Image: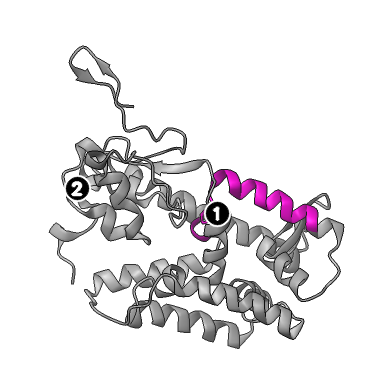
Amino acid sequence: MMSVSTYPGRTALLEKGWFSAYKWLLLRRITQIGILAIFLLGPWVGIWIVKGNLASSLTLDVLPLTDPYLLLQSFLAGHVLESTAVIGAIIVIAFYLLVGGRAYCSWVCPINIVTDTAGFLRDRLHLKGGTHFSRQVRYWILGMSLVLSVVTGTMAWELINPVSLVQRGIIFGMASTWFIVAAIFMFDLFISRQGWCGHLCPVGAFYSILGIPSSVRVSAVNRSNCDDCMDCFMVCPEKQVIRPALKGEADNIGPVIMSPNCTNCGRCIDVCAKEVFKFSLRFKNSNHVPMVGNKEVRS
């Protein structure tokens, strides 16, 4: 079992208090569960705030939202695109161009709850090792799903998309859906840490590409305060994105995490007792720190 001394965020919990040490995690769970609940209100109790699913929906019979990955598959499969679906995709693209494409993974996708739970238990059970997959595999799977859409004339990934299957499974009680969810959970728990979301899922790969120019970013704005406790690395689902921003000052690399694979989950902000990280904007990536007298001024 993981000892108290190595528990990530333990110091932040003691110094900042419970809410500040879990603030962004709580907001993410509220958002994820809330979004799923809104979709279920119609089938369960007849209150149709949103019709459809996370791939394609209509809110209040006015606002269309379409997963651009789904729309791209539909186009490649040779389907005629409806104007409502195209408008919905444009709205979604505009949103994620602002907040970061992979914010979908950490703030919307219900599978994230499953994989985060597996990661939590993996740490508590002190499970080590496992199969390593290159993080590039997800891009190959993304490419193959698009090629399959062309070859088969179907929205290939949507046929096995765990996100869609979970929603249908909750509504209709499909046993096969829960088998898939359990398989992803066991895969992340015993076979590969962050294996599904971090290495295999093509949805995350697609949204990482979409989010390349996004404005909202996590920034190690107070990186000079870092005491190398490694808590941020322990909780980050994409550990490779932290080091350039956190340790790149000597190489004149700015403090903003510019990698499109950052999920903007905010866990590094939560667990850091030194308050090194904050949400910021990509254009605030200057390595220059203004001086007043002989003191640095940091936000």
* Amino acid at dot 1: Gly
| Of the image marks 2 and 1, the number of the one nearer the N terminus | 2
Predominant SS of the magenta segment:
helix
The boundaries of the magenta stretch are 86-106
Q: What element carries label 1?
A: loop
* Amino acid at dot 2: Thr
The residue that mark 1 highlights is 101
Residue 15 is drawn in which quadrant?
top left
The N terminus sits in image quarter: bottom left
Q: Nearer the viewer, mark 2 or mark 1?
A: 1
Asked whether 66 or 11 is in front, the reply is 66
- Residue 147: x and y, percent? 66, 78
Q: In this view, does 228 lie to the left or right of 75?
A: left
Residue shown at 73% from the left, 63% from the top: 56
Asked whether 70 or 56 is in front, the reply is 70
Residue 166 is drawn in which quadrant?
bottom right
